[in-house]
Amino acid sequence: MDDKVVLRYRDGRTDRASLEPIDPTREVLQVPRDDGQIEEIPFSILKAVFVPRLPSDEPELPASGLSISVEFQDGEVILGTAQYNPEKNGFFLYPQDRSKIDRIFVVNSAITSIEVS
């Protein structure tokens, strides 16, 4: 994925970046920098990665998986659909309203609770 994404950190910071594909079995996110180097950002400091919906994106397909509510440590709650796997370091959540955000990579260790509805 070479999309511009929004990285949201647990301390409240945000950053825009292009990414290498996200591998939820690893514990780091690889971010190419302008100088050609790859920066590895540990999941332990990340909350989530928000992938914006671009005007050129295909019409949205319904997401498959469970309808869930994710509560983060900072109190934010996001509703959506996901194929949640607690064995991995994170998962993709497709928010209910995908008009601006297509999908969110949620870091498992940044959440307080998940409710299946």
Image (spheres, helix red, strand yellow):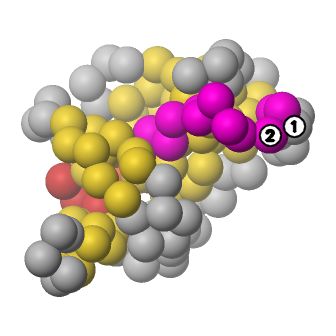
Mark 1 near mark 2, Cβ–Cβ under 8 Å? yes
Q: Amino acid at mark 2?
A: Glu
User: Looking at the image, which residue is at 19% across and 53% down?
Assistant: 45
Report helix, strand or loop for mark 2. loop
Residue 47, quarter of the rendered image: top left
Residue 69 in view of the camera: no
Q: Position of residue 13 (x, y in %)?
A: 13, 35
Q: For this view, does 69 lie left or right of residue 27?
A: right
Q: Tell me the quadrant of the picture where the C terminus can be found.
A: top right
Q: CA distance from mark 1 to mark 2?
A: 8 Å
Q: For this view, does 60 lie left or right of residue 92?
A: right
* Foreground tag (1 vs 2): 2
Q: Is residue 38 above or below residue 112?
A: below
User: Looking at the image, which residue is at 12% across and 77% down?
Assistant: 35
User: Looking at the image, which residue is at 17% across and 82% down?
Assistant: 37
Bounds of the magenta segment: 47-60
As drawn, the label of residue 58 is 2
As drawn, the label of residue 61 is 1
Q: Position of residue 69 (x, y in %)?
A: 61, 25
Residue 73, quarter of the rendered image: top left
Q: Is residue 20 magenta?
A: no
Q: Amino acid at mark 1?
A: Leu
Q: Position of residue 103 (x, y in %)?
A: 60, 40
Residue 34 in view of the camera: yes
Report helix, strand or loop for mark 1. loop
Q: Tell me the quadrant of the picture where the N terminus can be found.
A: bottom right
Neighbourhood count class around disc 2 (C-alpha, 10 Å): few under 14, some 14–19, many 20 upward: few
